[in-house]
Amino acid sequence: MKINGQHYRTIWLAQDGWRVVVIDQTRLPFRFETVTLGSAEQAADAIRNMVVRGAPLIGATAAYGVALAMRADAADPALEAALALLAATRPTAVNLRWALERMRQALAPLPPPDRAAAAYAEAAAICDEDVALCRAIGEHGLPLIREIAARKPAGQPVNILTHCNAGWIATVDWGTALAPIYLAHDAGLPVHVWVDETRPRNQGAALTAYELGAHGVPHAVIVDNAGGHLMQRGQVDMVIVGTDRTTARGDVANKIGTYLKALAAHDNGVPFYVALPSPTIDWRLADGLADIPIEERAGREVSHVAGLAEDGEIRTVRVAAPGSAVANPAFDVTPARLVTGLITERGVCAASSEGLAGLFPDLAQG
Ligand SMILES: CSC[C@@H](O)[C@@H](O)C(=O)COP(=O)(O)O
């Protein structure tokens, strides 16, 4: 997607041909800065500290982290150490495990001298494929928006609510939940996006609003608790969110607060769609509530907030009462029964074992 007229992906190789450049998401929307990663340790830090985040981009960064490790030492112990280091960074997004397993399968059979080149090629393939998958998600989601637009009075925008950031910044390009919105906007359909701010890290206010604004998509940032009210008043036509892990029966883990939006959508008859590429499906799991690991992040993300101070500096301030305990579960699980449909690169399906297996018979297990 474009920033100030220039096309960017979220991850690319530096001019030296081996280091890896990412956009520092901790500085957005106030500063567009990049970070250059030169080792698997730096890639792991970037994922852990959310310099990069979003399930597909976490997977892509981990893949390049393995490539960086192989350049330094391609022996078996080094490969295993890099895979373990990167796997331990964040627990919920299954794209991380998927990318690392794919790297292991590509590299382990090779003699060590061949591994670095193969690792870079595999990481690049993962990135290119992610772009294609996300673009396809956009194409399959577009008719859903078009149908709603056709039922609205002429000129009235389709109001779409989204939570967290599932746009191009969370992937390599295009995004998942935002891909259909970009295609609808580019096709001339009037769309307007309600952007949940998404405490505690404010990915909605900081990242989704930033990228929608850069693309010229009309939107408004709302506090996380406003969605239900807007739905009761008929001001939300549909919800589209991303996901960090979807089980084989269609339960969906996504940023904390997603479940409450699904409940409100259900109560108000608002369609609730989840957009995902197939690497986000964990075919080994069925019961998302019981089995998806939920990341517990530092309490400081709740007690403190970062923002742009009046003097133009990015500063962090405390918002919670000093001394109060805080808890910070970073994701929740929305049961399949609350999901209207899953928008994937192969089409839209029911959030159910049958729906997913029907679209992905080659990937579904059992
Ligand atoms: C296309 S990304 C889908 C999800 O990864 C996204 O909605 C999300 O929850 C990201 O969480 P984050 O903690 O910012 O990595």
Image (cartoon, rainbow, N blue to C red):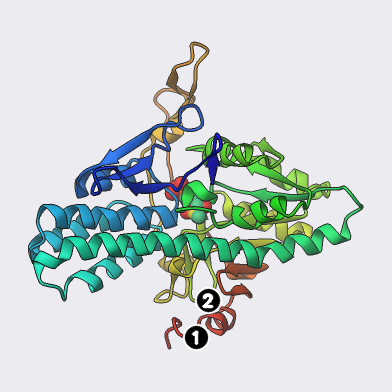
Q: Which mark is residue 140?
A: none
Up-down relation of residue 283 to residue 180 (above or below):
below
Horizontal and vertical percent position of residue 55: 43, 56
Image quarter (top left, top right, bottom left or bottom right) of the C terminus: bottom left
Which residue shows up at 26% across the image and 59% down it?
120
Q: Residue furthest right?
A: 153
Q: CA distance from mark 1 to mark 2?
A: 13 Å
Where is residue 18 shown, x and y percent of the image?
23, 49
Q: Quadrant of residue 177?
A: bottom right
Q: Is residue 98 above or below residue 203?
A: below
Q: Quadrant of residue 149?
A: bottom right
User: Can residue 51 be seen here?
Assistant: no
Asked whether, in this view, residue 295 is left or right of residue 254, the answer is left
Where does label 1 land, which residue?
A: 361
Answer above or below: position of 257 versus 223: below
The amino acid pointed to by label 1 is: Pro
The residue carrying pointer 1 sits among few (fewer than 14), some (14 to 19) or many (20 or more) residues within 10 Å by Cα, namely: few
Residue 82 in which image quadrant: bottom left
The residue positioned 57% from the left and 69% from the top of the image is 344
Question: Residue 327 placed where, x, y %?
Answer: 42, 41
Residue 117 left/right relative to 140 = left
Label 2 packing within 10 angstroms: few (<14), some (14-19), many (20+): many
Q: Is mark 2 within 8 Å of ligand 1?
A: no
Q: Is residue 241 above or below residue 320?
A: below
Question: Does label 1 or label 2 sit earlier along the sequence?
Answer: 2
Return the residue found at the far top: 311
- Helix, strand or loop under label 1: loop
Q: Looking at the image, which residue is at 47% across and 50% down?
A: 170
- Residue type marked 2: Arg
Q: State whether residue 283 appears in this view.
A: yes
Mark 2 — residue?
Answer: 249
